[in-house]
Amino acid sequence: MIEIEFRNGEGKSMKKLSLSLMFAFAILGILATSAFANGTVNPTGGHNEIIDPAGDVGRLNPNANGTGSGINNPNAFRDVIKSQGMIDNHGQLGDQKTHTSYQNNTNSCASCHQTHTAKARNLLFADSSYQTCSACHDGTLGFYNVFANGSKAGTAGTFGGTHSGNMSVHLANGAVKIKAAPGGNANGTGSWDGQFTCASCHAPHGSYSDRLLHYNPNNMGLTTPDQGGILASRIDVVDFANLNGGVSVSSDKFRAVRGTKTQHALSGTAYESIPANAVIIMVYEKNAGSTAYTKTTNPWLYGYTTTANGRDYYSRLFTVTKNEIDTIINWSQGFGTIRNFNAAQNFTNAVIDQNDYLNGSGIVSFKYDKGLVYAYPKTNADGTVDTRGVDLLNNAKSGHIGRAYAVKLDLQPVPGALSNVVTKHNVSALWGSGGSGVAVSQWCTTCHTDYLYSSSGGSTISGSRTSLHGNYNGQEYFGHTTSSAGYTCLRCHYAHGTDVEIMIDANGDNIRDLQKSVDLGGKGWTREIAVAYMKDKNPSSALKKATNMTGCWACHNSSKAGSLKNTNRDPQHPNGMMPDPSTKNEQQPIALGKVTFSTAVNFRTEPSMSAPLIGTIAPNTFVDIYGESDETFYLIYHNNTLGYVAKHAITKQ
């Protein structure tokens, strides 16, 4: 016999069995530090403003259809997926994603947009992007809960801190502008002058990165390196044989290189659609101080700002030298329109862009996601060979390539999740060989540009110790390394926010560890003492993972003095900085109720009768239930372990 009781957040009984699984893991975001620039008045006297979803969205979320379907009801996970239970492009039945991978019969748009009765620009059903996002991500519907705190907080920290815990957050509700970012351009215009929102960091319709990290944050994909971006502007096109010909330390940062699949070392299924005899042009990059170029795989940006004169595409090649580009491009119009554009032919031999694919019978092909353009000889029906595309690429002399950011993370599936998009980020995998920590830092510093600092000293962007944007009164500054595999932004900072509930000390302990009894490795402290010990005493906790300056002490506990070993330290000194607070294995799903059994039941690793046994749950033992993997198994949490119990072994009251 099984007894099931479900309670909501207020302790009131709920009648319905929840079939959803609520894992509160937050989305990875940008460089964790205060959202206020130097000299900017902090409106809360030392703390960032609290982001409160209840105050903005409340309990009246129309969820795009005006019915209030599923509001504050954990059973609503599937109700909110507007493309749930549909056949996809491959004839398979399942839930289609809300963000990205849209199918030809998609209904996912309805999750966020209203066609005729929207409350905000871009047809959002709520009156801002922040309110639209938090309607699902505030913990009420079973998706990632970015406001969860304490042991339920995700790997990106929390937006749900409190002033009493000296919280700080990336203020993503539009209250500040992007130029408020420390280390950014406080006097910037254009994208710098835009409001900072969820959409500043995440691209809801698709991304080249995990966690939907924005492919063009702060428009830096279309900004030149001297201003902190990665735009390959006015670059030479050279043959592969001349890849490093005439290169010096002062040569341009980028070159476009023309070669074959073999020369570019392109293999595998990602490139199998490109013929072996294709001419391929890719962007190569030279690091500061180097005299050699290496291949980049950053995707190229597709898009344009105007439809005049053939569209001013962000990624283009030219059959003139980089010094002659102005003779064929009018930069005063949008992103640069084509002078003397041949409207009848709709593409021109002077400019190689998407027009040559759309209106030139596909004579060239842009593979934007792989960062290249290619062409090959095409045999016509009459046996003649069309070499126009090959001729164009062979005649290319220069380029202007908008480039996207791509950050890959180590995402791990969550057992029992109702959707394959519910994953956990292994933050520690960012450090060391093969990690993406440097790519994360480069992404974060699209706003915090002065903070991309090299171990040799100086900004990796400006190459000097003076601010890229004239900060610090033009004086030299020094910063901690953020551009090496071991020392990146997320090593020390959370992306969303922090407060005393999730901060750690130099030993890696949080306030819950400190309250454990001594025999369990804790100190036996009361919560009041633990909070007072852990609370960051600085005016802003600056999204830090470790309280105060203990992140420094954890790494440098052996002292950096040239002739002194710090041997007189406390016996409880740290043994180095822990990989990441999220590795403490504290994160647990939110229980939907408790069950107890009249007889012993088997506890298995997977929802299968042939799965290995974790153990046996004794009769009359209360355990937490988190949902159902399917129609035959319950997902249970017992003895700090997730596992499955077959339904046929028990009966419900």
Image (tube, rainbow, N blue to C red):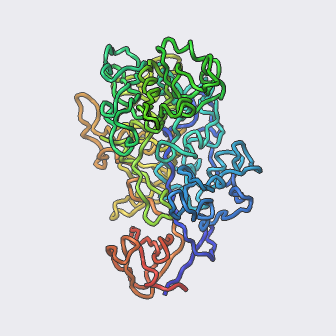
In this view, which residue lies farthest toward the front? 382
Return the x and y of residue 348 as percentages of the image width and height.
56, 22
Return the x and y of residue 544 as percentages of the image width and height.
47, 42
Identify the residue at horizontal 42%, vertical 77% (top origin).
645
> From what the image shows, is residue 153 above or below residue 556?
below
Left or right: 15 in relation to 554: right
What is the total number of numbered labels drawn onto the structure image?
Answer: 0
Please identify the quadrant where the C terminus is shown: bottom right
Residue placed most toward the observer, 4 or 309:
309
Q: Is residue 147 visible?
A: no
> From what the image shows, is residue 118 above or below residue 443?
below
Identify the residue at horizontal 73%, vertical 45% (top origin).
120
Q: Quadrant of residue 191?
A: top right
Q: Is residue 345 visible?
A: yes
> From what the image shows, is residue 321 above or below residue 210?
above
> From what the image shows, is residue 479 above or below residue 555?
above
Residue placed most toward the observer, 90 or 155:
90
Return the x and y of residue 563 as percentages of the image width and height.
22, 28
Q: Quadrant of residue 144?
A: bottom right
Residue placed most toward the observer, 357 or 189:
357
